[in-house]
Image: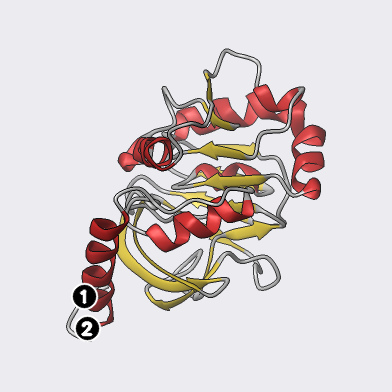
């Protein structure tokens, strides 16, 4: 069972294609698509995998308020090993505090990581990332108005070989707690990284090969070659 949280509004930068790709990879699996005004399936059940995609800053604040009452249940699931994949700015909801500098708004987030976020609409960052997550090489993109600050050396998701981490002063990207994976990386992440897709599904208890694996691997190898080329600008 895979739950997709708030897919009608948390779908920026092609993140909805992560769900599409998983449906193609696991054609017999059940996907629960929970809208923002609905009751999360995870409250009374234990999905194998929970997905949350990128969103606008306004939506981000709504999602934080939606999930705050369920913080204890979310932590229970994380501690039990349930797999979460939060992409784009979705993982920021698990930090301690978010400062929306342009709007002059301050918001306490869920506080699962002792990190803070600064969002500035006048400073968009676009770049590439090449790195390794638990032995799996990942190629991805980043496009954001925000950076995360603090020490994630004991909870990072990926170590960048090229590109930046949670902010330009570190190579440690994202956050991870057990199988809660929070990453700013886009692509969409799963279709462009078939090996990581298989790794993620294995964590969630599935023995499956990524959909269209031959074609996906050809594209992945080509992108890996490009990202490792010293001439490629990051």
190 in relation to 135, above or below: above
Q: Position of residue 99 (x, y in %)?
A: 55, 45
Name the residue that disc number 2 marks.
Answer: 229
Q: Position of residue 40 (x, y in %)?
A: 65, 22
Image point 23% across, 57% down: which residue?
215
7 in relation to 83, above or below: above
Name the residue that disc number 1 marks.
Answer: 226
Q: Is residue 107 left or right of residue 5?
A: right
Q: Secondary structure at mark 2?
A: loop
113 in relation to 104, above or below: below
**Residue nearest the viewer, comparing 82 with 146:** 82
**Residue nearest the viewer, comparing 38 with 153:** 38
How far apart are labels 2 and 1 at the CA level?
Answer: 5 Å
Image point 72% across, 57% down: which residue?
178
Display colour scheme: secondary structure
Q: Residues within 10 Å of mark 1 (few under 14, many from 20)?
A: some
Indicate the quadrant containing the N terminus: top left, top right, bottom left or bottom right. Answer: top right
Image point 54% across, 27% down: which residue?
30
Residue 95 seen in this snapshot: yes
Q: Position of residue 83 (x, y in %)?
A: 64, 47
Q: Position of residue 90 (x, y in %)?
A: 52, 42
* Marks 2 & 1, CB-CB < 8 Å contact: yes
**Residue nearest the viewer, comparing 82 with 120:** 82
Q: Residue furthest bottom?
A: 230
Q: Is residue 135 left or right of residue 168?
A: right
Residue 182 seen in this snapshot: no
Image point 66% across, 73% down: which residue?
153
Indicate the quadrant containing the C terminus: top left, top right, bottom left or bottom right. Answer: bottom left
Image disc number at residue 87: none
Q: Residues within 10 Å of mark 2 (few under 14, many from 20)?
A: few
């Amino acid at each position: 069972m895979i739950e997709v949280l708030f897919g009608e509004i948390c779908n920026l930068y092609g993140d909805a294609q992560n769900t599409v790709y998983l449906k193609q990879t696991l054609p017999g699996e059940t996907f629960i698509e929970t809208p923002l005004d609905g009751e999360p399936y995870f409250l009374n059940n234990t999905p194998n995998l929970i997905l949350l995609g990128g969103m606008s800053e306004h939506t981000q604040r709504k999602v934080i308020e939606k999930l705050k009452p369920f913080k204890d249940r979310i932590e229970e699931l994380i501690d039990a090993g349930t797999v979460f994949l939060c992409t784009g700015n979705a993982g920021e909801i698990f930090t301690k505090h978010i400062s929306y500098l342009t709007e002059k708004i301050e918001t306490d987030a869920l506080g699962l990581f002792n990190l803070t976020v600064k969002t500035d609409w006048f400073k968009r960052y676009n770049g590439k990332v090449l790195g390794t997550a638990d032995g799996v090489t990942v190629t991805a993109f980043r496009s954001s108005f925000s950076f995360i600050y603090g020490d994630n050396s004991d909870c990072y998701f990926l170590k960048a070989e090229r590109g930046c981490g949670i902010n330009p002063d570190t190579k440690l990207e994202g956050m991870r707690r057990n199988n809660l994976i929070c990453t700013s990386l886009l692509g969409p992440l799963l279709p462009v990284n078939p090996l990581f897709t298989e790794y993620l599904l294995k964590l969630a208890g599935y023995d499956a090969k990524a959909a269209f694996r031959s074609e996906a691997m050809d594209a992945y190898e080509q992108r890996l070659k490009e990202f490792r080329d010293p001439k490629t600008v990051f």
